[in-house]
Image (cartoon, grey):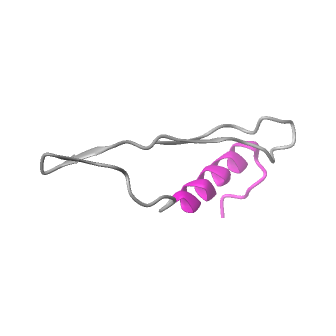
Amino acid sequence: LQIFTKPIFPQPTVFFEFIERRVAWVNGKQMQAQGFGEGNFLALFEAIEREQMKRGSLGKN
């Protein structure tokens, strides 16, 4: 699970990212999450872009 907060100050430059890592069961064995950050940059970029579009500070092009 990965969640980004809305900016916490009037200038939209600071926000928080919450990440929950979970274990998974594979073939009856409990496996810890491995790796970290795969896809995080893309998710962050898309979240920032959505917020900019909501504020009207990013064109829809």
In this rendering, position of residue 13 left or right of residue 6: right
Give the number of callouts.
Answer: 0
Against 40, residue 11 (above or below) is above
Q: Which residue is found at the position 34% from the left and 49% from the top? A: 32
**Region rendered in magenta:** 40-61
Against 45, residue 29 (above or below) is above
Quarter of the figure with residue 18: top right
Q: Which residue is found at the position 13% from the left and 46% from the top? A: 28
- Residue 19 locus on image (x, y percent): 52, 43
In this rendering, position of residue 45 left or right of residue 20: right
In this rendering, position of residue 5 left or right of residue 58: left
- Between 28 and 58, the one lying in front of the other is 28
Quadrant in which the N terminus appears: top left
Q: Which residue is found at the position 78% from the left and 35% from the top? A: 8
Q: Which residue is found at the position 72% from the left and 42% from the top? A: 15
Q: Is residue 53 magenta?
A: yes
- Between 21 and 49, the one lying in front of the other is 21
Q: Is residue 55 magenta?
A: yes
- Residue 38 locus on image (x, y percent): 47, 62
Q: State the predominant SS element of the stretch in magenta.
A: helix
